[in-house]
Amino acid sequence: MTALAEVTGRDTIAVRQVVSNRFRGGLSTVVSPITQLGLCVATVPAGSDGFDEAVAAVARAALPARKYAYYDPLAMPGVSTPCFNDRRRTGATAFDAARVVERPGAVEWVAPPTGPTEPLFLHADDVPGAVRLTLDADTARFSPADVEAVARAIESLVTLTLSL
């Protein structure tokens, strides 16, 4: 969210995060997707100076987004917010600060995903000794320069945080 604040120049950012909505016993018989996009809205400072404050703000906003991810997305036409899917296993990623690379990573433009997707979708996956971030973007809605700016801002924040 901090990277989006940096690129857009806005400090209040909305992101929909993939959440499991099956933890309430009273809803065990409901027929619906096992995951849904929960709306997370937080005010975050742009750039790395306020990173700790941004993490705290997002943590406060993420819990209600996970807990109350019960809404009809079809009843919200025109809502278009970036999405985030953290597919990492808890505690699975171990980092070695001595191995933090301070050169820019590669940007690879590939064919669009098959099937429906959101205009801007960030996925986080475990890989040995690292986290793989994949940013799916609709370049008809976002310029390639803006997409790369978001990716570079995320990379810069992650690299800075790991090197502290």
Image (cartoon, helix red, strand yellow):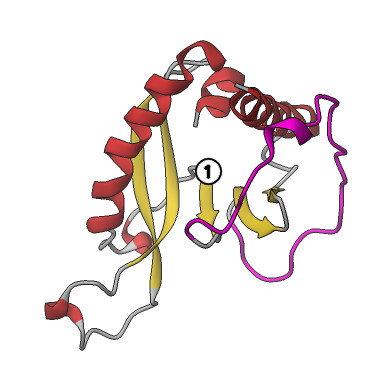
Magenta stretch in the rendered image: 90-117
Badge 1 is on which residue? 82
Relative to 32, does residue 81 appear above or below in the rendering?
Answer: above
* Residue that lies at the very extreme toward the top in this rendered image: 49
Seen at 29% across and 50% down, the residue is: 65
| Res. 113 image quadrant | bottom right
Observer able to see residue 97: yes
Observer able to see residue 12: no
Mark 1 nearby-residue class (10 Å; few <14, some 14–19, many ≥20): many
Q: Residue 137 appears at what percent x and percent y?
A: 69, 46
Relative to 113, does residue 10 appear above or below in the rendering?
Answer: above
Q: Residue 98 appears at what percent x and percent y?
A: 74, 31
Q: Nearer the viewer, residue 135 or 119?
A: 135
Q: Residue 132 appears at what percent x and percent y?
A: 70, 51
Horizontal placement of 88 versus 56: left or right? right
Seen at 21% across and 84% down, the residue is: 28
* Residue that lies at the very extreme toward the bottom in this rendered image: 29
In magenta stretch: residue 140: no
| Res. 117 image quadrant | bottom right
